[in-house]
Amino acid sequence: MEDLFGQTASVKKESKNLFADVILPVPIPKWFTYRVPDEIQDKIGIGFRVIVQFGKKKILTGIVGKVHQKPPAQYVAKPIMDLLDDFPVVNALQIKFWNWMAGYYCCHIGEVMNAALPSGLKLSTESKVQLHPDFDLENPGIPIDDREWIILEALEKRDELSVEACEHLLESKSTHKIIKSLLLKRAILVYEQLKEKYTPKIETRIRLKNAYVENKEALEKLFETIAGKPKQEEVLLKYLQQVPVFHQPELNDKGLIKKSVTEGGCSPSSLLTLIKNGVFEEFKVTISRFEDRMVDHDRMGLSGFQEEALEAVKRQFESKQTVLLHGITGSGKTEIYIRLIREVMESGSQVLLLLPEIALTTHMVTRLQSVFGSQMGVYHSKYSDNERVEVWQGVLKGKYNFVVGVRSSIFLPFDSLGLIIVDEEHEPSYKQFDPAPRFHARDAAVMLAWLHQANALLGSATPAFESFHNAENGKYGYVFIDQRYGEAQLPKFHLADILQDKKKNLLKLDFTRLLREKIQEALNRQEQVLIFQNRRGYAPYISCDECGWIPQCEHCDVSLTYHQFGEELRCHYCGFKDKVPVSCHACGSQKLSSVGTGTERIEENLSLLFPEARIARMDLDTTRSKYGYQRLLEDFGAGNIDILVGTQMITKGLDFDKVTVVGIVDADRILYFPDFRSGERAFQQITQVAGRAGRRDKMGHVIIQTRKPDQLIFNQIIRGNYIDFYQQEIAERQRFFYPPFVKNIKITVKHKDRFVAEKTAKNLRNLLMDIQVKKIILGPEKGLVAKIKNQYIYELWAKLDRTGNAQTLFKQELVEKTVFLNSQKDFKGARIIVDVDPA
Ligand code: ADP
Ligand code: ZN
Ligand code: ZN
C-alpha cells in the first residue's frame, strides 16, 4: 500500500529519507517517529499538523516537533498520512517551551499540547473528509475497492462528509481503515472542521449606492419610482430608519447586515430587486468578535514617582531579565505598564500581559483597550473555542501584537516577545491544578521570556515569597513604590474584637458594633461598602442539636454545605446535591441547625441589619454565567448597590472611588488554614481587599473582625510592613525546609479501593527512596480530604535541593517509576498525579 505513494505523485522526487518526530495527544511520555513521504518532504517542518496512524486502529492529529534523518531503532516507522497545513500553526519556540514544561512539571508533551491548542486546532477521527483536489475520479491510477468507491462517489456529490456519515453509508463502524487507505492513496483529505473556525467570520452587508447619499433629490426621485411597490418602499424605509444618510452620511459606509434588513418581515426578493437596480450595493466585511474600540490619544502623564519607577524598571532590565515591581495598592502600576508596553510595541516586539482569571473584566482592561484599541487581543477563560481560535490567529497573523489574557495565554503563538508582564503575580489562581500540565503561569512566563530573550515584569502589592526571595538574592531586579497615586491615602485600619463584643452582647448577626457603625456611616454618606467572607453558601454545615449528626457527601469525605438559595445541601468538592433533611438521619430529632457563616448568610444578616441598603453578593454561585461577574461590577460601579458581599473575588483589582469601608468578617478563618503558606496568603488577601478602600480623595476604613486582635500579623498588615512580615516568615520556612528553600513535589495517589491507593502510595515511596539524590520524602498520608468523588486519596511529598541537578534527576526517575508502577498488575487502576511546586 505504501509504495502507492510513488505512483500517484506526478513528479517523482529524489527521496531524502526524512523522519518526523510527532507530538501526539496520548498519555505516553515520548514523541513518535514517522516516515515523511516523498511528496511532502519539501513542505513539512516543525509546527505543522499531520495525520498519522497510531497503534492498530487510531488515526490521530499530531504536531511535528522535529524533522531528521534518523530512523527509529525499535520499530519500522509508519508513513505520515496527511499534512494539514500550508504553514506551521505553532513555532519552534513554542515546541521548546512545551518541552520545557513537560520536563519541569513531570507530564507528557502531548498533555502540554492539549492544554496549549484551542480545541479548534486539534483534530480527531470525528473530522470531516473531502475529496483531495488533485485526485481524479475518472482516472484514479490506483486500485480503488468497492467500499472506497461508495465514499468517493458520495464525496463527489457533496463537499464533505463526516466520518460518521461515512459509517452510515457503509453501514459499518470500521470506516477508519477505509479512510486511512484513501488517505494513503491521496484520494481524500481529512478536512478540518476548524478551517471554518480558523477563518474569521464574514458578514454580508448592504449599503445605499453613493449616488443617493446626502442627495435629497436623488432619494426623492427614487421614492417616486418605487411608489407603486410598497414592499420595496418598506425595505428602503427600514434602511433609512437605521441609517439616516442625511444627518450622518458616514454611517452608510458601514451599512446594515443584509439579513437584519429582511428579518422583521420585509421581503427578501424586494431587497434583491433593489440591489439589482443599483439602489443598494452588497459588500462583505470580515468581522472580529472583539469590537474595535477607539484609541484614546490623550495620554495620561505619569506622576513624579511613577516616572521614577518606570526609569528604575528600565534600568534594571539592562542587567536583569526579570524585575519585580512591588507597588502598594493604588500606586498606579497600570500606567507604568502602559508606558512599557507602548515602548516595546513601538520597537516591533510583542507583549503579553497576564492577569488573574477574574481581573480580566475590570477597569484595567477597559483602560488598556482605550489606549491600545484593536491592536490588543483579549484571551479570556470563558471564551468559546471560536473566540480562542480567533485570538490565536490574530497573534499568528500579526493582528495583535499585544495580548491581555489569563494563564493559558502563555501558549499563544508569539514569535518575538519583547516583554511579559504578570500582574498580581502572587495570585494563587495562576497555578493550574487540573489537568496536567500543572503549571504556574508566572514561573512559566519567566521561562517563556527567557526563551524569547525578552524581559519579564512581575507586579504586585504583596509579592509571592518566591518572587521576593529571588529579588532579595539578586536573581530578579526590584523596584518599590510606596505611595498611592494622587490624593488617595492608604485606608485606616481597625481591629474589632469578636469575643469582647460577644461578652458585652454587642455582636449582632456576626457583626461587631464597630463594623456596623462604619457601615452605617458609609451608607449615610452614600458611599459604598465591601464585605469579605471567604466561604460561599449559607452555612458550612448543618448539625443535629441532639446527637451532633452532620450530613456528609456520599462521594467525598466532607460535610455538605448548606445553601439557602434553592434549599439544598451541596458538596463543594464534587457538586453532589441533596435536599435539606427534615429530621436527623441518626436519631430522628427534628432539631437541626445551621452552623457557621457563608456569604449567603452574611448577605441575609446584612439585609436584616440594614433593611434600607441595596445589597448584592459576588461569589462562584452568582457569577457562573459568562457575564455574571461583569454585570455585578457594572451595577456596583453605577451605584446601584450599596453593599457588596463576596469571597476572594472582591479582593482583585476593583477600583471604585465610592468604596470607603471594607469589612473582613472573619480574619481568623483566613489565618488558620492548615498550609505552610497560610500566613503569606492571609497577609496578601487582607492587604488586597483593604486596598479596595479609599482609592480617591475619600478616607477609607478597613475593619478586621477577629477573636485574637493582638497577633503580630495584624500589626504588620496595618503598618503595611511587608518586609518585616516576610523576614519573619522566611526564617521559619528555611528552618523547616519549605519553599523557596526546597523544591516541593506533591504526589497524589487515587483509587476507588482504599487499600490499593494506600499500597500503591507505599510502594511508590519505596521506589522514590532509591533515587540517588539528596531528598526528603514525607508520607504517604491520607489527603486532607481523604476521599473525593469516591476515590481514596493518599499523598506523598518530596522536598529536593534547589541547587545542582537534583531536581532534574529526581523528576526523570519519578516519571519512569510512576509509569513502571502503573504497568504492574497490582497497581494498574491507581492514578498517580505529580504536582511540582504545588500551591
Ligand atoms: P495599582 O494597580 O497599582 O493598585 P492602579 O493602576 O489601579 O493602581 O491605579 C490606581 C488609580 O490611580 C487608578 O484609578 C488610576 O486610574 C489612577 N492613576 C494612576 N496613575 C495615574 C496617572 N498617571 N494619571 C491619572 N490617574 C492615574
Ligand atoms: Zn441526631
Ligand atoms: Zn462530594
Image (cartoon, rainbow, N blue to C red):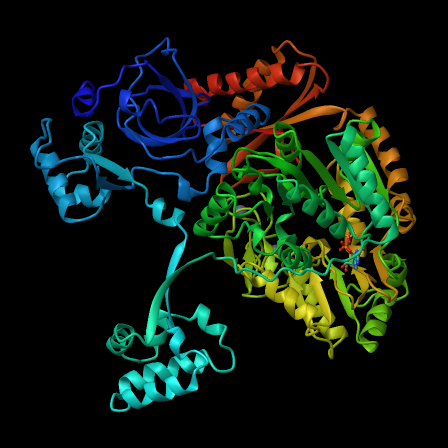
Does the rendering let one see residue 549?
no
Nearer to us in this view, 671 or 274: 274
Where does the image place residue 317, in percent across and percent down from the top left?
A: 76, 33
Where does the image place residue 761, in percent across and percent down from the top left?
A: 56, 23
- Residue at (85, 73) in percent of width and height: 521
Does the rendering let one see residue 616?
yes
Nearer to us in this view, 302 or 621: 302
Q: In which quarter of the image is residue 262?
A: bottom left
Answer with left or right where residue 738 lies relative to residue 712.
left
Answer with left or right where residue 240 lies relative to residue 415.
left
427 vs 589: above or below: above
492 vs 61: above or below: below
Q: In which quarter of the image is residue 602?
A: bottom right
The quarter of the rendered structure image containing the C terminus is top right
The quarter of the rendered structure image containing the N terminus is top left
- Residue at (65, 18) in percent of width and height: 807
